[in-house]
Image: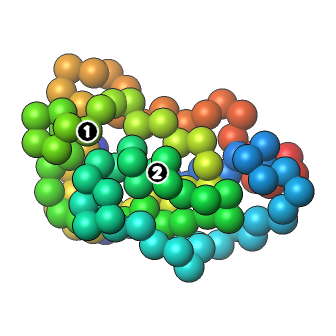
Amino acid sequence: MISFSGGILAVVWLSTICPAMEIPISEPAMEIHIPEDYSTIQEGIDAVPCTGAKVIVAPGIYSPDTNGEQYPLIMESAVFLKGEEGAELSAGTNAVEIQISPDSGKPGS
């Protein structure tokens, strides 16, 4: 289980999503709120445009049993995953909770 402590959990940039764009490595203005905007974290991650967004996870337990969250979470775009204090990811018996694309990196790399 991963517990957020109110900070950024992961930042992922995948230059092949928007190869012609220079995306600054700073927190984007767009915010996606879980569960207000999308019921699962993965749906929020999938909705991030190539210009980036913060996916902010509200307090609660995010698991297959509570909200239908499926693991591992796949992060392949310009995502800032940020949890509010009290947000927990629980994959149950799965060993991997977050999978970051091996091709991810800073734009232009």
**Residue 25 horizontal/vertical position (percent):** 70, 67
Tell me the residue at 18%/27% (across/down): 92
For residue 32, side relative to residue 92 (left or right) = right
Label 2 element class: helix
What's under tag 1, amino acid-wise? Glu
For residue 83, side relative to residue 12 (left or right) = left
Is 17 or 7 nearer to us in this picture? 17
Question: Total number of numbered labels?
Answer: 2
The residue carrying pointer 1 sits among few (fewer than 14), some (14 to 19) or many (20 or more) residues within 10 Å by Cα, namely many
**Residue 82 horizontal/vertical position (percent):** 40, 63
Q: Which residue is mark 1?
A: 69
What's under tag 2, amino acid-wise? Ile
Residue 22, placed above or below residue 60: below
Residue 8 appears in the rendering: no
**Residue 11 horizontal/vertical position (percent):** 56, 55
Residue 50, placed above or below residue 25: above
Q: Which quadrant of the view contains residue 91?
A: top left
The residue carrying pointer 2 sits among few (fewer than 14), some (14 to 19) or many (20 or more) residues within 10 Å by Cα, namely many
Quadrant showing the N terminus: top left
**Residue 80 horizontal/vertical position (percent):** 51, 61
Q: Which residue is mark 2?
A: 45
- Work out which residue is located at the far bottom of the displayed protein and give it: 29
Label 1 element class: loop
Q: CA distance from mark 1 to mark 2?
A: 12 Å
Tell me the residue at 25%/44% (across/down): 89
1 or 2: tag closer to the N-terminus: 2
For residue 12, side relative to residue 19 (left or right) = left
Tell me the residue at 29%/48% (across/down): 40
Which color scheme is applied? rainbow
Q: Which quadrant of the view contains residue 70?
A: top left
Residue 76 appears in the rendering: yes
Tell me the residue at 32%/65% (across/down): 37
